Amino acid sequence: MNAHNLATEAAWVLVGSIDDIPRQGSRRVHMDETRIAVFRTVDDRIFALEDKCPHKNGPLSAGIVHDGCVTCPLHNWVISLETGQAQGADDGRTRTFPVRIEGRDIYLDLTGKSAAR
């Protein structure tokens, strides 16, 4: 294993189990000063977004999960769970984090390499 592989492996952080998150719900985790919302869809897909809406920094973890999106509880902006991009006429993006599932455990890649800006 070379140094690149070691660095890649070190980026994955265990944040909990799928069973910790209700379907169409979320859990919030903190990584240093960053709040991350981990979402579970009705069909058990898991996504992770920075827990702030691109509009007014509303807590997306308190939003409604539906159709591969979350609706911000403050002003009803709809954010794609896959890309972090605001939907419809709204413009903006929330940072995303790659997710890896091992068994029922959820790992996040916190390097930010593929995270949206």
Image (tube, rainbow, N blue to C red):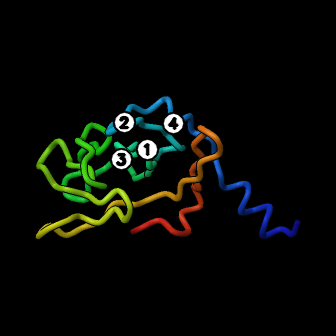
Q: Amino acid at mark 4?
A: Ile
The reply to whether residue 50 is in sight is yes
Q: Are marks 2 and 4 in contact (CB under 8 Å)?
A: no
Q: Earlier in the sequence, mark 2 or mark 3?
A: 2
Of circles 3 and 4, the one toward us is: 4
Q: Which residue is mark 4?
A: 18
Q: Earlier in the sequence, mark 3 or mark 4?
A: 4
The reply to whether residue 37 is in sight is no
Q: Which residue is mark 2?
A: 23
Q: Amino acid at mark 1?
A: Asp
Q: Amino acid at mark 3?
A: Asp
Q: Which residue is mark 3?
A: 51
Residue at mark 4 to residue at mark 1: CA–CA distance? 8 Å
Residue at mark 3 to residue at mark 4: CA–CA distance? 18 Å
Q: Residue at x 50, y 30 (%)?
A: 19
Residue at mark 3 to residue at mark 1: CA–CA distance? 20 Å
Q: Are marks 4 and 1 in contact (CB under 8 Å)?
A: yes
Q: Are marks 1 and 2 in contact (CB under 8 Å)?
A: yes
Quadrant where the image shows the C terminus: bottom left
Describe the element under mark 1 as helix, strand or loop. loop
Describe the element under mark 4 as helix, strand or loop. helix
Residue at mark 2 to residue at mark 4: CA–CA distance? 9 Å
Residue 16 spot, x, y in % from top left: 56, 35
Few, some or many residues within 10 Å of mark 1 (<14, 14–19, 20+): some
Describe the element under mark 3 as helix, strand or loop. loop
Q: Is residue 74 left or right of residue 16?
A: left
